[in-house]
């Protein structure tokens, strides 16, 4: 969704936009931002000594997707999204009660991806090592995986809250639904690894020998499969798919929330004279 840029602090560089010429009237050069859907012909705005650059009202347009395009995709095709969220709302106006939650969700999903990348890299490095270094690398990879699952679980929970509280027109991605229960169970085990080491589960400290399975990950280094009790997920494929879909959910929520606020404003505005 496009928004006219507003609320930009003086001296603070937030983003950039491609300007294209509109017309020239003597020393006045009119320009506007290139729309995201337009073909870029490469035409540039030329200013000569004494020229005045004029961007008329409504012609300086910031698009959330254009801002997002400046984020560089990394491993798995995932690009960090927190800066997109932060930049968008610092241009269009920070919405109290929503921005910090939404920004925190974006940061948590970004963090889960960063840890996913680290775990995969460490696992790949371990595969090429001899017995001792291979084992040490495996433990490093598994440690990063544990924290990634913990971050991912919180991201899933916040994505659900985003839909429930702010964007009821959106849905949880299928890739998240498929592994949500497994991620929750593994998160609980990794987060409370000290309790699992004693085969204890829950606030009551119930003895559960099966909970020790969180320490047994024979397939992880070769096939990327994590297991816990009767749950299993492919850390490399399943988690990446969920991260990419959560990222898309965040981008869709930007437009959904903006459209909802625009509708509410239109419905609550007093009628104009002569309407």
Image (spheres, helix red, strand yellow):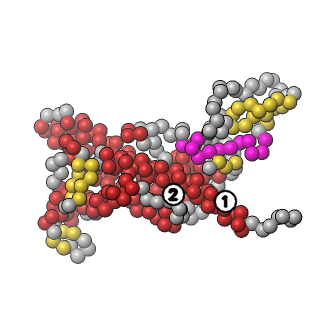
254 relative position to 114: left or right? right
Magenta highlight on residue 63: yes
Magenta highlight on residue 87: no
Viewer can see residue 153:
no
16 relative position to 219: left or right? right
Residue 270 x, y percent position in the rendering: 78, 68
- Name the residue located 14 percent from the left edge and 34 percent from the top edge: 130
Q: How crowded is mark 2: few (under 14 residues within 10 Å), some or many (20 or more)?
A: many
Q: In the orientation shown, which residue stands out farthest toward the bottom?
A: 204
Q: In the orientation shown, which residue stands out farthest toward the top?
A: 48
- Name the residue located 64 percent from the left edge and 61 percent from the top edge: 261
Q: Distance between the residues labelled 2 and 1?
A: 18 Å
> Helix or strand or loop: what does disc 2 sit on?
helix
Placement of 214 over or under 15, stated as above or below = below
Q: Do the residues labelled 2 and 1 touch (CB within 8 Å)?
A: no
- Name the residue located 54 percent from the left edge and 47 percent from the top edge: 84
Q: In which quarter of the image is the C terminus?
A: bottom right
Viewer can see residue 251:
yes
What's drawn in magenta, residue-wise?
Answer: 56-68
Q: Which of marks 2 and 1 is nearer the N terminus?
A: 2
Residue 253 x, y percent position in the rendering: 53, 55
Q: Mark 2 points at which residue?
A: 102
Q: Name the residue under label 1.
A: 262
Residue 42 occupies which quadrant of the picture?
A: top right
Residue 99 x, y percent position in the rendering: 56, 58
């Amino acid at each position: 969704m496009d928004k006219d840029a507003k609320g930009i602090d003086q001296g603070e560089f937030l983003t950039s936009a491609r300007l294209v010429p509109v017309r020239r009237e003597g020393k006045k050069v009119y320009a506007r931002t290139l729309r995201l859907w337009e073909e870029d012909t490469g035409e540039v705005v030329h200013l000569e000594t004494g020229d005045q650059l004029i961007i008329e009202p409504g012609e300086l347009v910031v698009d959330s997707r254009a801002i997002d395009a400046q984020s560089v995709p990394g491993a798995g095709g995932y690009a960090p999204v927190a800066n997109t969220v932060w930049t968008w709302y610092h241009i269009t106006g920070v919405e109290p009660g929503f921005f910090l939650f939404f920004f925190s969700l974006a940061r948590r999903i970004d963090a889960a991806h960063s840890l996913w990348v680290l775990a995969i890299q460490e696992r790949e490095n371990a595969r090429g090592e001899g017995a001792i270094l291979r084992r040490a690398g495996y433990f490093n990879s598994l440690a990063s995986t544990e924290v990634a699952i913990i971050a991912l679980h919180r991201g899933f929970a916040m994505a659900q809250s985003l839909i429930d509280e702010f964007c009821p027109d959106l849905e949880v991605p299928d890739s998240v639904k498929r592994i949500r229960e497994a991620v929750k169970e593994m998160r609980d085990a990794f987060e409370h690894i000290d309790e699992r080491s004693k085969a204890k589960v829950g606030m009551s400290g119930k003895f559960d020998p099966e909970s020790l399975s969180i320490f047994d990950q024979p397939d992880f280094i070769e096939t990327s499969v994590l297991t816990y009790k009767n749950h299993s997920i492919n850390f490399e494929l399943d988690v990446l798919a969920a991260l990419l879909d959560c990222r898309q959910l965040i981008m869709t929520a930007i437009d959904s929330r903006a459209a909802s606020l625009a509708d509410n404003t239109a419905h609550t505005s007093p009628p104009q004279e002569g309407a």
